[in-house]
Amino acid sequence: MCRFLRSVAAVYMAVFVFCCVHNFYCSSAHHLLEQYELLDYETTRLAEHHRRARSADPDRRLADHFELQLLAFGKNLTVVLNPDRDIVHADARLTISGSKHSYSLLRYSDHMVRGYAANYPESTVFGSLVNGVFRGTIVINRFQAHSDMHILADSYFVEPAGYYFEDIVGFHSIIYHSSHVRGQEVHKKSIRGSISPAPHFCGLSNPEIVQKMQDLTLSSHTRAQTLRRSKRNADLPSDSNDPVSKSPIQFSAAEAPKTFAPHSVSGSRSASKKSCNLLLQSDTLLWNRVIKLRHINNDADAAVTEISVLLHQHVQAAQTIFDSHVFRDHSGKLEFSGIGFRVDQVVINITDVDCKQRSESSTRDRNYATQSDMEKGGSYADQNPFCSDSIDVLNTLNLFSQNNFDAYCAAYLFTYRDFVGGTLGLAWVGGACSKNRVESEQNVRKSLNTGLVTLVNYGNPVLSQVSQVAFIHELGHNFGAWHDDVHKNEPYGCLPSAHDPRGNYIMFASATSATKENNHRFSRCSLDSIAHFLHRLSVDGRDCLVHSDGPFCGNGLVEEGEECDCGLSSRTCRDKCCNPRNSNSPCKLVESIIVNGAAKKVRVQVDGSV
């Protein structure tokens, strides 16, 4: 159901636009959406202002922001947006297959924004601005992952209308609330017409896939030697309940040691933020989907931008979740504060280049084209197995893993393949930071720091709310977490009952609605597994996590370019002279404060004190 109402959206910083939110009875945008509203606001002025902000010098761009006021579902939201530059490396590259050159990714990543909703201290907003249109996620009440507070994540999702409508004109976006998404059981019935076996939201919930993944990796003898060596090297005893230690899909590699020391529970936390650098790739099936969207209209450059921001938005979602957790083991001896993510490269495959039809006169070798071949000149459809739309999820991941991704913490393939059984994603457990090497007895070289996510399910596009959860779930596997049902007999409450109002955790084996508190949290068992995995990366000399490229406003440390740093939000800020990260002037001093009833101007003294 979509509803009809009128509202006004104001964009400040010399921009003012009117927004119409239309609500009337019409065909459903998506079979899992119970309710949504259509957005139509004038975008020209916002697009021009955003273009000027993107082309301005870096110092100006850091201070620039946009304010977008929306009335949706009876709630007045003022969204404050800033350029999101923490998520992309300054030297990140974009490779469009068939091109002999790569391009700076900043041209496309500059569309990314992050901010907050005014008057909601625990809110967070992330997404993109493309041609004056915002698409993204607005979380009104962001939960605190490390606290015992029971706060339901109150989230809105804004997506291009072209994802769900082929013929409706006059609207550029839809907006829906997380509670408007129907549950998985309704999904099963609406697709099949009757009760069927539970869909495999994650491929690792299918025992057959797990067994095949074991067969595709190390032999049992070599695997046992690897695990014994890992236990001997650890300076803390292995937890017998740690599923990563028991995992048959576990990896090691020789690499120069890099320090990633766990925090002492009683000691101070590291001042430096560590990030997992990513390669993100889209295949030709996703290209086929995007290039035909109504708002893309067969424009190749627009399709490249669309895919780029789509991939980046999934990383923003992962950043929000992983960065808010403290990964602590059950014993309390290991503690790691958050994991960041940074995009270092994006590869976009184009059908006309990577799946060319071979002419009868062509004499080109029909052997399988490698990734480097595809980047240089594309490939023919009969050479490139990715051109087939009938590859199952395991073979898709296995083929993708045959590329060398040694330069990255993790590499992900985004596709538009409708996998059997409703599978949305698959990843190698404990594969983060692993190096390309010979796996299995077939002497095939693979990179197991890989995973994939598909954006179609049972013939329907996957809602952003669902695909973001799938991506976060698969990254959890890469960092050593198994499904929570592995821990069902353990005393840590990692598998809540079906009647628990807080819902299941991120690593639950089946799809979650992402509307409940636990849907945005890792369970204690996942935290324990990831903590042990991060520890093993350090003691085995395999740590590939990189330091942040610069100051991070909100970490409580005054770094270069910051006047102060009192944390992420006004709720946690204890320095009345400082603006927190979710303010109009993040990590800048306030202009004045009230002292004994009088306003006093705030200034920095020569010694740096306030």
Image (cartoon, helix red, strand yellow):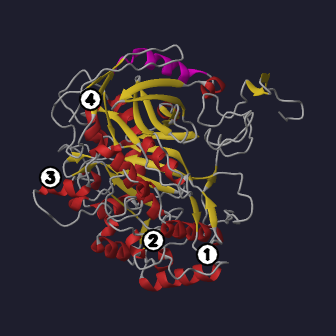
| Disc 1 to disc 3, C-alpha distance | 45 Å
Query: Which residues lie in the magenta part?
Result: 41-56
Q: Nearer the viewer, residue 138 or 450?
A: 138
Q: Which residue position is annotated with label 4?
A: 298
Q: Are marks 3 and 4 in contact (CB under 8 Å)?
A: no
Residue 306, quarter of the rendered image: top left
Dot 3 or dot 4, earlier in sequence: 3
Q: Is residue 102 visible?
A: no
Label placed on residue 410: none
Magenta stretch holds residue 50? yes
Residue 219 is situated, as x and y percent measured from the top left of the image, at 42, 81
Q: Which residue position is annotated with label 2?
A: 493
Dot 4 or dot 2, earlier in sequence: 4
Magenta: main secondary structure equals helix
Residue at 62%, 72% (x, y): give it: 540
Q: Amino acid at mark 2?
A: Gly
Image height check: is 325 above or below 349?
below
Please identify, in this view, whether the residue under mark 4 or under mark 2 is nearer the observer.
2
Q: Amino acid at mark 1?
A: Ser
Residue 499, quarter of the rendered image: bottom left
Residue 293 is situated, as x and y percent measured from the top left of the image, at 25, 33
Image height check: is 188 above or below 574?
below
| Disc 4 to disc 2, C-alpha distance | 50 Å
Q: Which residue position is annotated with label 1?
A: 331
| Disc 2 to disc 1, C-alpha distance | 16 Å
Dot 1 or dot 4, earlier in sequence: 4
| Disc 3 to disc 2, C-alpha distance | 32 Å
Q: Tell whether 428 sits left or right of 588.
A: left
Residue at 67%, 46% (x, y): give it: 555
